[in-house]
Image (tube, grey):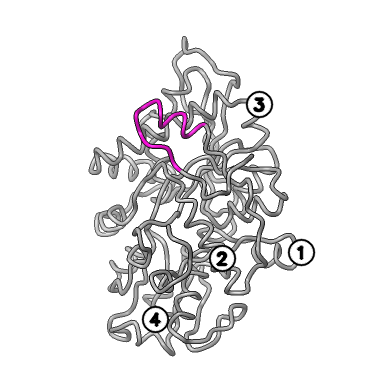
Amino acid sequence: MPATTGTTVKTLRRGIAAAAALPLLIGALASCGYGSQSEKTDEKKAPVAADAKKLSASEVRIGYFPNLTHATALVGIQEGLIAKELGGTQIKPQTFNAGPSEIEALNGGSLDIGFIGPSPSINGYVKSKGSNLRIISGSASGGVKLVVNPDKIKSLDDLKGKKIATPQKGNTQDVAFLNWISEKGWSVDPESGKGDVSVVRTDNKVTPDAFKQGSIDGAWVPEPTASKLVADGGSVLLDETSLWPDKKFVITNVIVSQKFLKEHPDVVEAVLRGTVKTNEWINANQDKAKASANAALKALNGKELEPAVIDPAWKSILVTDDPLASTLKTESDWAVKAKLIEQPDLAGIYDLSLLNKVLKAVGKPEVADAGLGAK
């Protein structure tokens, strides 16, 4: 990802709501993530072979969302691809519906490894002053769309004066939209959401109902919410992927507790071998992987996604080992530009050494940390 200067980057609208050290900023951005605040919704252990050899830890607690943007975790655990690499070390999965609660679990010592978005990754790193987590891999890119009511909005210029939902004040999609508005030359107060466009912060769970009832005219949201809106009569006006020069931007990272990384690097490496093999399997078996992810969602949520929702949503998400570190930095810069946060110190947020070791072992190219790696 090129630096955020010049005309090619002026169309980037994706931001990060990273919490800075100041209390007001931390409070304002404590809810950065993909949806509303949530509690842990699942806690069980994946089975292992009775004669399998344990690594340095008897179990590893892995957190993720029951969400398509966490496909690596959904499929990797569902298909046993991660467990296979862990041998006798047992996976203890835990699911969350929002980043803050997952970060709290990681920082509180009840979670070892997590799949999570860029905004809460930065938030958690900055709040702990760089002491509690590391980003150790990428997981997914893309999966964010602007969906509108086609009867009210037929072009991007028609957004002026309309009500457009984002998941939360200061979350990645919210800042992305604020930046897009700014590039259009329009003005919106980032705190209230009032201005040339009314930015309505709405939980992803209720956005489809708000859209059907007409209380919002559209939404800048991640999958599968975007495809749910389309199934309800909405039209995709913009896919955020098209706004990035390389058509890639981070939507999900893999993070680890620094304590767990230090004490059990063999377990972390085994998990990364599993995620790399999972991503390879997903990309080589799209239909089977989509079905596996949907089966996992049914087990976790009690119901699967309808074809009209999962088919377009799945196509818009790219699983990747690359954390796309330069895009995380760009997103953070946009949040600063939006005046939602002060400039965070992200030095050391990445440790890609084990990932690159795994990638090298299977003949894949190493990935970069954009100068933000641990020393």
Q: What residue is shown with label 4?
A: 217
Could you classify mark 1 by the number of other residues whose Cα lies within 10 Å: few (under 14), some (14-19), or many (20 or more)? few
Could you classify mark 3 by the number of other residues whose Cα lies within 10 Å: few (under 14), some (14-19), or many (20 or more)? few
Please provide percent x and percent y for residue 38: 58, 54
> Left of 355 or right of it: where is 373?
right
Q: In this view, does 230 lie above or below 352?
A: below
Q: What residue is shown with label 3?
A: 263
Q: Quadrant of the C terminus?
A: top right
CB under 8 Å between discs 4 and 1:
no
Q: Give the range drawn in magenta.
A: 354-367
- Residue 75 versus residue 177: which sits nearer the camera? 177
Please provide percent x and percent y for residue 136: 53, 40
Per the model, the C-alpha gap separating discs 2 and 1 is 20 Å
Q: Which amino acid does label 3 sit on?
A: Glu
Q: What residue is shown with label 1?
A: 23
Q: In this view, does 100 lie above or below 334?
A: above
> Left of 134 or right of it: where is 143?
left
- Residue 252 versus residue 79: which sits nearer the camera? 252
Q: Which amino acid does label 2 sit on?
A: Asp
Please provide percent x and percent y for residue 269: 51, 28
Which circle's residue, 3 or 1, is located before the other in the chain?
1
Which circle's residue, 4 or 1, is located before the other in the chain?
1
Q: Please, what secondary structure does the residue beneath circle 4 have?
A: loop
Per the model, the C-alpha gap separating discs 3 and 1 is 31 Å
